Amino acid sequence: MNRFTRNTYVAAVQTAILGILPFILVGSLVTLIGIIPGVSDAIPTMSKISDFTFGLIGLFVAFLIPYQVMEKKKLNSQKLIAGLAGLALFLMLLDPTSGKGSAITFDFGRFGATGMFVSIVGGLFVSFVMVLFAKVDFFKNNANLPSFVINWFNSLLPILVVVAAGWVFTYVLSWDVFAAILKLFSPLTSIAESFPGFVLLCFLPLFFYSFGISGWVTMPLSFPLWMTAIQENADAVAAGGSATNIFTYEVCFVGFLTFGGIGGTLPLVALMNFAKTKRIKAIGRAGAIPSIFNINEPIVFGAPIAFNPLLMIPFWINGIVVPAMTYLALDWGLAKIPDKVFQIWYMPYPISTFLVSGWRGAIVAVILMTVSCVIWYPFFRAYDAQEARKEREEEAGETVASSGETVENGKQK
């Protein structure tokens, strides 16, 4: 998995996703302000702020992926040109409509989360072309020309290849590449929205995490699905319909599954504060405040959960049972399916659940935490008892060693 995540192209997608998170958080803050009673009526509508932050993430990713690939390949002189070529190709693949004169009309909805898959595919294509042509230098033996002039001419051919590809598909063949790419990924979307697919995709990051591998390894797959799903929910509600997509960031990270952090470790932290073992109790107290804000590295690697069978097993069970219960609760209408982007993941539970799913969602979250606590309890008791025996044995050994040293010192005297 480390080899996979260190791949230049995979790492570039991950870095690009990290790069757009501040824009998504701005959209989340607009959502939060709109929820506060009385505030939304007292100020002008802020929806356009969300449109030009969260609503442009597809465009941003189209620039960032080629830029990051060039940077990671140490081709710094080409990274800005590669990013701009990515923008040019992405705009062509949006299949704009030509009007009178020089007027070109774009579907604004394609710039945002809906365009994530297109921007990733296009960005990777641009990156491949730019890296391929980076080996070609038309002025290799000419030291008289300025370096920026050499870079200009060396970039002409790859830019031409990239733009020509977009021109052929969009204008010569009249093929809506945007719709074709979405259709290509639609089976993956269908799998993610099914019960077994939802549970599996929620379980995988947790499973890797239990072996010390960051859940970010699955982010290039999950993130576009999350963003597309929440955008479709918002569009459906705006059109007078209802939200139906459950596999969203708002469900998986904000509202229902990650109380205390990935794997639902907040109940474990509460139990650790009543441990008989001094070490476990100390870790529980140290990890309490971070866990309230859904940060659980101190627990995963301090308790530890990672590579510890007694705590890995309930970690995995939670990773299956809690997503399964969440999916059924939302599918059966027991709680509202989120329909607005809200990715402030460090908001404490169940406050965050209330913000994305209302009172019924908050009640479901409390039930989920209770079930999670029941799952953790017997394994925690066994682990606490095991560690308590170790502490007693260590204390007994120290007492014997101390007594032996005293006797030895007495004989010397």
Image (cartoon, grey):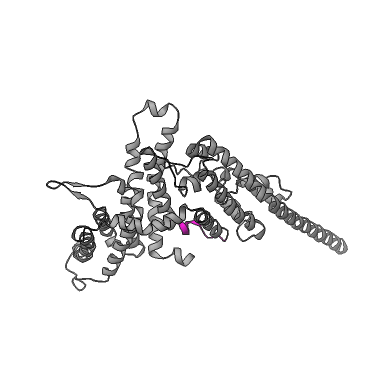
Percent x, y of residue 286:
62, 46
Front residue of 329 and 370: 329
Percent x, y of residue 228:
39, 50
Percent x, y of residue 244:
44, 45
Residue 66 in sight: no
Q: Please identify the quadrant where the C terminus is shown.
A: bottom right
Q: Is residue 339 left or right of residue 44?
A: right
The picture quadrant where one finds residue 139 is bottom left
Look at the image and say whether residue 214 sits in the magenta stretch. Answer: yes
The number of numbered discs placed on residues in the rendered structure image is 0
- Residue for point 53% across, 48% down: 327
Look at the image and say whether residue 283 sits in the magenta stretch. Answer: no
Front residue of 228 and 86: 228
Q: Is residue 365 above or below residue 159?
A: above
The picture quadrant where one finds residue 11 is bottom left
Front residue of 307 and 54: 54
Percent x, y of residue 297:
56, 52
- Residue for point 65% across, 56% down: 311
Q: Is residue 3 above or below residue 255?
A: below
Find the magenta span and give its range.
211-219
Q: Is residue 297 left or right of residue 14?
A: right
The picture quadrant where one finds residue 179 is bottom left
- Residue for point 84% across, 62% down: 404
Residue 55 in sight: yes
